[in-house]
Image (cartoon, rainbow, N blue to C red):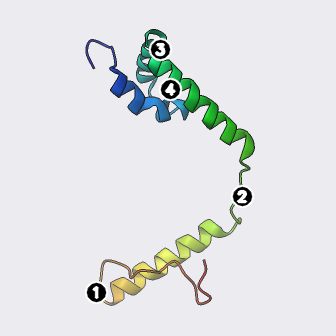
Amino acid sequence: MLLGILSCKETIERLDDYLDRELSPQEAKLVVRHLKICHQCAKRFAFERELVEGLRRRLHRIEAPADLLEKIRTSLEAAEMDAASHGNSNPPRGVLKDNQGSL
């Protein structure tokens, strides 16, 4: 970046974060500034924006079971205690599964 101006490469690298509203206000301004003066990047941005907005319209949010977080915490705590009792600070693989093979 040179004096508050992003290159095409820097702008393209930030497009996903810009679309997801994950950039700082300053970085977002730099992206917008570049898109206003660069037809190629603006064209790419328009395509990606349409793609993301289309996906957001068509995808439905799936709610996790209410007790999922508690099951994960319980499994992690049990794995940590088991690992500690065996002198191992790293829990074994598959520790998030219960006796039936699921959380």
Crowd rating for badge 4 (residues with CA inside 10 Å; few <14, some 14–19, many 20+): few
In the rendered image, which residue does mark 1 sit on? 87
Kind of residue at disc 4? Arg
In the rendered image, which residue does mark 2 sit on? 63
Which dot, 1 or 2, sits closer to the camera?
2
Dot 4 and dot 1 residues touching (CB under 8 Å): no
Which dot, 4 or 1, sits closer to the camera?
4
**Of callouts 1 and 2, which one flags the residue occurring earlier in the amino acid sequence?**
2
**Of callouts 4 and 2, which one flags the residue occurring earlier in the amino acid sequence?**
4
The total number of labels drawn is 4
Kind of residue at disc 1? Gly
| Residue 30 percent coordinates (x, y) | 41, 17
In the rendered image, which residue does mark 3 sit on? 39
Crowd rating for badge 2 (residues with CA inside 10 Å; few <14, some 14–19, many 20+): few
In the rendered image, which residue does mark 4 sit on? 44
| Residue 40 percent coordinates (x, y) | 45, 19
**Of callouts 4 and 1, which one flags the residue occurring earlier in the amino acid sequence?**
4
Crowd rating for badge 1 (residues with CA inside 10 Å; few <14, some 14–19, many 20+): few
Dot 3 and dot 2 residues touching (CB under 8 Å): no
